[in-house]
Image (spheres, rainbow, N blue to C red):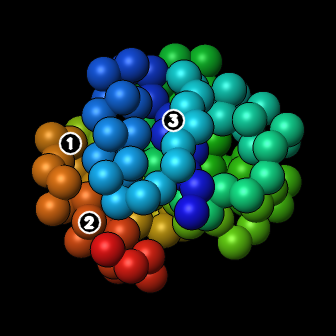
Amino acid sequence: MRALIVDDSSFIREYLCKLLGRMGIACAEAVDGSDALAVLESQTGFDLMLLDLNMPVMNGLECVKALRKARLHPDMKVMMVTTEADNHFIAKALDNGADEFLMKPFTQESLREKMMLLGFAA
């Protein structure tokens, strides 16, 4: 299994890669939505994208919209990973193609639970 971690914080990217690595998941990284789309256009085999909402250049909502419109990796699950707790933003992201939300700060157990909701064995 392979995941793309998209966050402008190098700490969050490293932390998520470490947690996913413990679950046997290989990770690639991107620093914003535009970078993520470039990675997805040039590489295959991603099962999951963990996508921050608030990033410079291209935010997570813009990224998931573009991703779904372009039909890049159509079977890939998208989990928004964010501090944004506003139901309006959550609903908008889900309406535009996100599959799940993980609120920051999070633990390995909360990440594992969300992975199971998306159909990935823990």
Q: Looking at the rendered structure, which numbered label has been put on residue 11?
A: none
Instruction: Read off the residue under disc 1.
Output: 104
| Residue 21 rendering spot, x and y as whole percentages | 38, 48
Q: Looking at the rendered structure, which numbered label has been put on residue 6?
A: 3
From the viewer's side, name the closer residue of 116 and 67: 116
- The quadrant of the picture occupied by the C terminus is bottom left
Q: CA distance from mark 3 to mark 2?
A: 18 Å
- Measuring 31% from the left and 52% from the top, which residue is drawn there? 22
Q: CA distance from mark 3 to mark 1?
A: 14 Å
**Mark earlier in primary sequence (3, 1):** 3
Residue count near mark 3 (Cα–Cα under 10 Å), binned few <14, some 14–19, many ≥20: many
Name the side, left or right, on which 106 lies relative to 34.
left
| Residue 119 rendering spot, x and y as whole percentages | 44, 82
Q: Is residue 92 visible?
A: no
Q: Amino acid at mark 1?
A: Lys
Name the side, left or right, on which 55 lies relative to 105.
right
